[in-house]
Image (tube, rainbow, N blue to C red):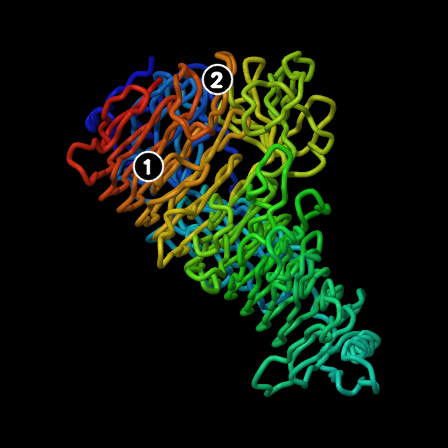
Amino acid sequence: MSTVTPCVHKPAKRCAIATLQTLVCGLFIVSGTVALAQRDFPTGPAGVSAPGVSPPEFPQQADAPAISMISDITFPGETLVITGAGLDGATLRVWAGGKLAEVAPLKSADDRMLAVLPAELPLSTTLVWPVKGDRIGRPIRVNAPVVWWRFPTRVLPGKTVRLFGKNLSLKGATSRVCLEPGGRWLEIVNTNPYQIEAQLPDKLAPGEYKLWTHNGTGGQSGWSDPVDVRVMERPADVSRAVFRVEDYRQQGMDDSSAIQAAIAAAARAGGGQIVFSKPRYALGTTITTPANVAGGLHLRAEDGMRARPILEPVCDAPLPPVLLRVGTRFSTIRGLEFRNGADGGKQFCVEIAAHDVTVEQCRFLIEDKRDWSLPMEKRRHLLIDNGALQLNAPGEANIVVRDCEFETPGAGVRIGLDYKERTEPYTNFTCIQRCRFVGTFQGVYAIPRRKGKSGQFIGPQESGYRSSGVVNDNGIATIVEHCEFRGADRAHGKVMGRSIQCHNSAVRHQYWAHNTCRDVGNHSSLGTINRNMGEQFMFHIAYDPGGIFHVTKATDRTVTLDLADPRLRGQVKDKLTVTSPAGSVLRDEVGKNDYWIVFICAGRGVGQWRVVSGAQAATLTVDRSWRVVPDATSRVVLTVSYRQNIVYANTIHNTELDKDHKNHGVIFWYNGFDNVIAGNRFHNQTAGVVFNHGFRNPTAWNLTRDNVMTQMYGMTGDTSRSAALYVDHYRWSGAWPAEEDRVWYSVGDIARCNRGDHATVAAYVHTRGMERRRLPEYPSHRNGGIMLKVVERNEFSEVDEGIVVSAPANWLLLRENTVQPTSPQTPPAYDETLKKPLDPAMTLRVE
């Protein structure tokens, strides 16, 4: 049976803070052979002095306790979540900004620990050492700058480069970026904790450079890993040559011939401007631009035109599949309007199929040309799911879409192809800024009959599956910022179903920031429409599964799977509900791309994850060394995962809360690692932030902090039992895993410093039945389950229910939360398994 153990603060015993000199001189007399502590974090560019105070070095012994993973972005006064080895009975030595502290944990076991950073420490790059007796382990960093990716990957001298990650700026410190070679500090254009933009010098020779980031604290221990950027030579100035479409017009021909002729002339000249000066252009065929034009092709409106020139199909002609296909690198499209219709034949406006293309100040309009006068029984299934603007340029695309408008019943911008039609590599490194998206989806056009289902069944494919502002099917490293999303008339049958969505679990490195979503989501005014849609920022599972494996052996950079295990045999009918190793498979592609990760879900090294960088037979090579090497006691989940995505400072606001339709803020449908959801505002929805995880679909080390969520009521579809401000749950269906298979389903997910009010439920941390029913039993997960979840320093008021938890939430910490239910008889926190109230200010739930 599960137990609930209260945690009591004992500040005098928990930590002691002293000066650096006192601790170094007085505490570290050790016997035997010692060595300076090894570090697995960068020391910065050679010869460059870093800002801030550097930490000390301490001797280390081989049998010392070890930290394998730690919760990052943990400020003074907040809880550290730690996994490792030999931690039972250990304490922590913590250094920050020149101060050292001795910290006793709230609770520890051999492979896990919870401890609070002393509130008196400065906010700084922080080093943490595990200590047991006279043995001290290798340090690990917290709040140090970590750069995940950059944009663009290719840049001209004098332009800016943006770096994305976490802890890139800290309050009270000055962030910096250093250029190598040369050791030159760059001018910082703007920064926030998750991105920093630096300007390159005007006179910079073409070539390969490295950029190092420092958040102004930690001295030589405060550097990020470097990222590469290629400085390009300025192209020859051929783009000033002008080719006016009107100069190439022929008698009796539609406008497509004249446009194509102007493009051909500019291409022969090595590049130039194709200028449009008429109000309208009728296209009988698709316009294409050739490859290998050194100066690029630049399509634009004539200077001084008061309205955008409109490019549209010839009247009464069949709808073209696409109006313009751009295949020329370094091209631009500026100040034009593209109008097409869609009748279910996958039509769209413009396709970008080349790298280094910029689209600015354009408008894209798709009209629904299906015959709505037909009765439902006579309609064919005609789905509009293309983007008005398709970005399909595999590789380091470096595509920018800026200051544009989109109005469409389908997607505004679609990145890449459908998951099953994807090309390798994906269309990576795209930027969508200051765009306006308007959705005009009108509901289900036809309801096909399905075997075993009613003819009135409405599935997602028939119900505006891609009626979204931005659909990212195959794009790694994507920026969507300062954009506006809305339905054309949500209350009267013209909607946008979602704002931004991903349908490929291999997608990562998304930066969605400072966007505004108003009146987005399906609505009762449409009648026939799927009620179980409307997740505004959605990361939906889609990829062939891997599985769960026993480990036979491992080294510092490898792990070998037991592929001969007889329990792997069998088929998987539903990758989300399987609760055994059956059907687990090492797919041929593993190690040939960087999509796959291994997550140690049991045994030695539990809680760690690494990217698979190579594979030979059953042995996987990982991208960086294990801090605690797994062994034959370990088990791993092999999967692709949404990882290292940032959803920051967005506003999602609905004028009306439609209680009959699901409408969530941010949702991860399984497989999310090291993601940040911070500083957002959610209003009039059915859930704020949601994480789902399962037996073979884990989540780990995700942070939800500093969000504001209000008015969460209504129907939640198949997500949670009731509307809630925050949801984190294990998805259960049919059967629990066998006792030996009750591994870690998640670890280190944190909800911190969020504020919310007026909701059915404050927060869920529990098990959710897939059939929307309460579970008949909760078997023990003494060494597994929802592990090391922290819910702290949140303020929830005017809620019908408080924080709801259940088994197998194991080592769950509720700390310093304020919860005010609407009824004084309702407990502020409640355990569904034990059927007893909890203290949201300090409870540690241990199975």
x, y (%) of residue 422?
70, 46
- Mark 1 or mark 2: name the one nearer the start of the chain: 2
Q: Residue at x 48, y 43 (%)?
A: 532
**Residue 87 visible at all:** yes
x, y (%) of residue 276?
69, 82
- Give the amino acid at mark 2: Arg
Residue 104 is drawn in which quadrant?
top left
Q: Which mark is residue 763?
A: 1
**Residue 415 visible at all:** no
How far apart in space, not on screen, are marks 1 and 2 (Cα)? Answer: 24 Å
Residue in front for this viewpoint, 74 or 774: 774
- Foreground mark, 1 or 2, reads 1
Please name the residue that numbered disc 2 is placed on: 742
Crowd tier of the residue under label 1, counting other residues whose Cα lies within 10 Å: few below 14, some 14–19, many 20 or above = many
Residue in front for this viewpoint, 775 or 221: 775
- The secondary structure type at the circle numbered 1 is strand
126 is higher (above) or lower (below) than 429:
above
Crowd tier of the residue under label 2, counting other residues whose Cα lies within 10 Å: few below 14, some 14–19, many 20 or above = many
Q: Left of 255 or right of it: where is 532? A: left
Total marks shown come to: 2
Residue in front for this viewpoint, 352 or 497: 497
- Give the amino acid at mark 1: Ala
Residue 730 is drawn in which quadrant?
top left
- The secondary structure type at the circle numbered 2 is loop
x, y (%) of residue 505?
59, 40
Image quadrant containing the C terminus: top left
Q: Which mark is residue 654?
A: none
